[in-house]
Amino acid sequence: METKGAFNPEKDIPDLAGKVFSSQEVGTSGLGKQTILTLAKHGPKHIAFTGRNKKNADSVLSEVKKIAPHVETAYYECDQSSLASVNGAANAFLSTEPTRLDVLICNAGIMGGPMGLTKDGYEIQFGINFLAHTLFTKRFIPLLDRTATEFGEARVVNLTSSGYTMFPGPLSFDELKTTQKNIGMGGKWARYGQSKFAQVIFGSQLAKHYSNITVVSIHPGVVHTNLVEGQPFLDRIFVKMTTIGQSVPLEQGTYNTLWAATIPLQGSIESGSVYYPVGQHQKHTKAASDAGQWKRLWEWTEQQLE
Ligand SMILES: NC(=O)c1ccc[n+]([C@@H]2O[C@H](COP(=O)([O-])OP(=O)(O)OC[C@H]3O[C@@H](n4cnc5c(N)ncnc54)[C@H](OP(=O)(O)O)[C@@H]3O)[C@@H](O)[C@H]2O)c1
């Protein structure tokens, strides 16, 4: 397929028979749910997903059953603002003794919102958007590693955002366990950019550590999901004004995730890289190219999650 820009899920997603996907979160209207529904149409063996809303999860389970009755699905409750909850969901998935995990999609996220801390005391956007996904990834590495050895490949797809480019770096490690009230110009938007910056650089370091696992950070594009529509009025206007003419429909907003999760590798994906829609390789920003930061974040994260 032509990987630069054009993507047609009907034609470009290969048969997924036998593959196992795990998507971190699902919501009523977000990219995560739509991604699951499209993946299901292509016949993987199993899709496991997490989320914090059982009612929404039940509706996803029944929608998948309707469109793809042979695809196994499983829901694991998880609130990503709590590392204990992440560990609980990871334990529940691993206790089923899965034989493979082909693709881990780290999708859940919040943007902006009031200052706050996670249940473990981390800045809230950093905790939910970066640390929770990283804990899932860490817990699933042995299985991903085994899958890559036995079946030829395994992938981690992180949903970052073009907003990561706004974060000038470096990370203030001493402040990640505060509300980061004084992070500077942009406040909540800077904290969002910081969390997405961390996803990108951690992904690059992860790719270095595990050369047999393909790690990709993708920006899905601008999509008016609840991430945007759920903002207070003035913030919503701000987001819409600054992204005028860029928004794409929900389904199209999943193309880059689907591309990264399913496209035959064959040299099309460079592990550790960032891709904009669809499949367009982006050079890391200068701040995100600092290998010292990659290493420092890796070590800091190891300490926090040990
Ligand atoms: N939409 C865009 O324009 C855009 C642009 C760049 C990047 N992204 C990224 O794409 C990803 C998906 O965003 P989206 O547009 O689909 O937004 P969305 O519709 O708001 O979905 C976000 C999902 O994350 C879940 N979530 C939030 N906090 C959680 C928590 N504490 N524990 C568990 N789940 C939680 C939400 O669950 P609930 O339903 O329970 O709230 C929701 O299902 C995010 O990482 C976002 O940063 C989106």
Image (tube, grey):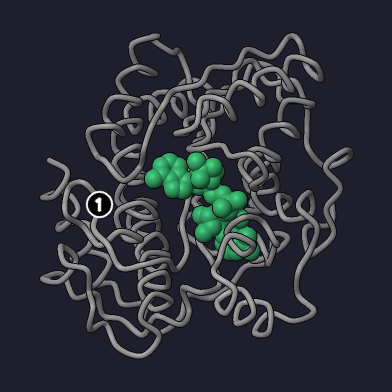
User: For this view, does 115 lie left or right of residue 231?
Assistant: left
Residue at far bottom of view: 185
Could you say whether the residue bearing mark 1 is in a helix, strand or loop?
A: loop
Total number of numbered discs in the rendering: 1
Amino acid type at circle 1 is Thr
User: For this view, does 131 lie left or right of residue 196?
Assistant: left
Q: Quadrant of residue 229?
A: bottom right
**What residue is shown at x 35% (from left), y 51% (from top)?**
128
State the residue in front, 234 or 220: 234
**What residue is shown at x 41% (from left), y 30% (from top)?**
144
State the residue in front, 262 or 236: 236
**What residue is shown at x 71% (from left), y 63% (from top)?**
277
Asked whether mark 1 and ligand 1 are closer than 8 Å, the reply comes as no
User: For this view, does 244 lie left or right of residue 96?
Assistant: right
Q: Quadrant of residue 136?
A: top left
Place of residue 54 in the rendered image (x, y in percent of width and height, measured from the top left)? 51, 25
**What residue is shown at x 64% (from left), y 19% (from top)?**
61
User: In the picture shown, does residue 64 fall above or below 185?
Assistant: above
On the image, numbered disc 1 is attached to which residue?
Answer: 118
The local crowd at label 1, few if under 14, some if 14 to 19, many if 20 or more residues have their Cα within 10 Å, is some
Q: Quadrant of the C terminus?
A: top left
Residue at far front of view: 233
- Residue 211 in sight from this viewpoint: no
- Residue 188 in sight from this viewpoint: yes
